[in-house]
Amino acid sequence: MKKTVIFDFDGVILDSFPNQYKWFQHISQRLGRTFMHSLEEFKSDYVEPVYPNMYELLGLDWKKNKSFIWGEYTEYMRNAKVGLVPGIADVLEDVRGLSLEMAIASSNTSDIILKHLDSNRLGHYFRAVITKEDLAEPGRKEPRLKPDPCCLYITLKQLRVSPENAIYIGDQTSDIVAARRVKEKMGKEMMTLAVTYGYARKAKLMAYNPDFIADRPEGIVPEIKKAFSL
């Protein structure tokens, strides 16, 4: 029976939160808005789906400025220098050593995710990489981003894994909610492992009662072992 570890990308594998903070400073300035948040305030207020929720929270009018924002975002991210979460490559190697399948289920774009996987030589660890482009549906203006569980449905079906044999590792409350909502369509709930070094504060994550929690990357593998009784 296959056991699968599914990772979110930003904040779990990629240390992108500081860059995301700088991005919102940048786009606020470009749209003539004053950006008043400190880094910690930004982390406390951060919500998903990022668009429109985070843009609207900051008064950036997603609907009106969507085309301009995407153009700016593409150019900004092309030049951004973002590294991996320190120690995460060792985590992936250790998970592989447990003979567990791995996948990524993210709301980020395929070009950004694949660029970082390729440049850091991590692509070979993952049997599936589900991205924003996979979440579009005919007739919908926006893709089904978390907390919608669409990215997890797709991942589980592609790998032919039942939810109870999988665990989702995320850093935001929307990751926990998405994993719990898998049961709506697949009849069974998957486990959740929340990491507190990413985009959300620990107290915020704990309020959603994840099944397991890790404060540092090196804490991930012991929790996976507990989850699968290894």
Image: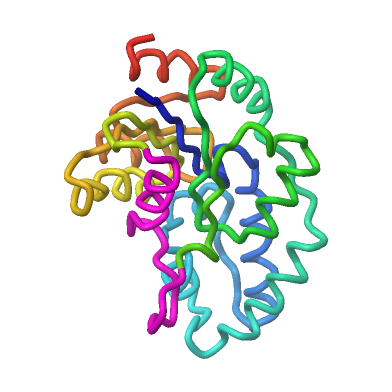
Q: Is residue 152 left or right of residue 74?
A: left
Place residue 165 in its image quadrant: top left
Q: Quadrant of the N terminus?
A: top left
Residue 138 lies within the magenta run: yes
Q: Nearer the viewer, residue 84 or 21?
A: 84
Where does the magenta region start and end? 136-160
> Please, which colouring scheme is shown?
rainbow
Q: Nearer the viewer, residue 102 or 70?
A: 102
State whether residue 48 is above or below residue 2: below
Residue 91: x, y in percent?
60, 22
Q: Is residue 67 left or right of residue 81?
A: left
Place residue 203 in its image quadrant: top left
Q: Quadrant of the C terminus?
A: top left
State whether residue 57 is above or below residue 81: below
- Residue drawn where x is 40% and y is 18% of the image: 223
Task: Provide the major secondary structure of the magenta segment.
Answer: loop
Residue 35 lies within the magenta run: no
Residue 74: x, y in percent?
72, 70
Residue 179: x, y in percent?
31, 44
In the current view of this chain or complex, which residue is farthest to the top?
A: 230
- Residue drawn where x is 75% and y is 51% of the image: 115
Residue 143: x, y in percent?
44, 70
State whether residue 39 is above or below residue 221: below
- Residue drawn where x is 44% and y is 24% of the image: 214
Q: Is residue 200 left or right of residue 119?
A: left
Q: Nearer the viewer, residue 144 or 139?
A: 139
- How many numbered marks does the figure carry? 0
